[in-house]
Amino acid sequence: MSKQFHSRRKFLRTLSGFTGLSLAPNAFSQINTMPLESGHEQPLASAKKIPLVSHQEKQLDFLHLHTGESLSTTFFSGNEFVATEMSEVNYLLRDHHNGEVFTMNPELLNLLYDVRSALGTQKPFHVISAYRSPATNEKLRKNSNKVAKKSLHMQGKAIDIRIPGVDVKDIHKAALAVKGGGVGLYTRSDFVHLDVGRVRRWGK
Ligand SMILES: [Zn+2]
């Protein structure tokens, strides 16, 4: 077992201890051994607390077009975002202008996952821009009227992407269907802006 794997297991155990999720395995073992005949079942109320999806893994792939760095990550496992993976995501999605790393909003990862699932593709997201420090945002704003003063990029809630071989209009359509936040279409620059702010749309 690699050291990294070992430490992750340890981390997940620690995490589950804090969140009270350690109750779940017991609940499952009770269900698994539940007799079919009546008389010994657990009360229905305790069964109701068990989530329908007991163990879900969510995976994403990225290539950052400005740094050339790529990442394949299982960012969600069991009932939790995997903190060590999220750190790698945060690093990849840092402000590529000055290297500043920010904590990305985990819901953005869920949104990307849902959009890719809706498109039925396993291809990586090509990242044009993700986190933007206030300094970078201000610099970009001087050169473009498309950059918002209080951009959600500055809050780690937005990303500009494309997927190789997939029409940006199709990405736009899929993202609108997911209704996870704002969706901007930039056909001329060939990318889609996704954020986890209010549900809204713009661009052509
Ligand atoms: Zn954007």
Image (cartoon, grey):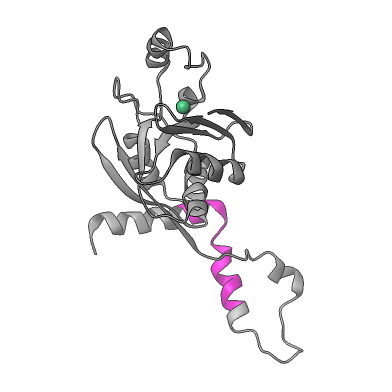
Residue in the image at 62% along x and 78% along y = 31
Residue in the image at 52% along x and 49% along y = 114
| Image position of 80 with respect to 101: above or below | below
Q: Is residue 123 magenta?
A: no
Give the image quarter of residue 125: top left
Q: How many marks?
A: 0
Q: Is residue 156 found left or right of 47 in the rendered image? A: left
Give the image quarter of residue 187: top left
Residue in the image at 42% along x and 33% along y = 191
Q: Is residue 16 magenta?
A: yes
| Closer to the camera in the image, 172 or 28 | 172
Of all residues, the one furthest to the top in this rendering is 142
Residue in the image at 41% along x and 46% along y = 166
Of all residues, the one furthest to the bottom in this rendering is 37
| Image position of 204 with respect to 151: above or below | below
Q: Position of residue 151 (x, y in %)?
A: 51, 20
| Closer to the camera in the image, 204 or 39 | 204
Q: Position of residue 110 (x, y in %)?
A: 51, 46
| Closer to the camera in the image, 142 or 99 | 142
| Image position of 44 with respect to 58: above or below | below
Q: Position of residue 108 (x, y in %)?
A: 50, 39
Which quadrant: the N terminus? bottom left
- Magenta region's main secondary structure? helix
Q: Position of residue 58 (x, y in %)?
A: 45, 55
Q: Is residue 67 found left or right of 73 in the rendered image? A: left
Q: What range is drawn magenta here?
A: 15-30
| Closer to the camera in the image, 51 or 129 | 129
| Image position of 159 with respect to 171: above or below | above
Q: Is residue 67 found left or right of 82 in the rendered image? A: left
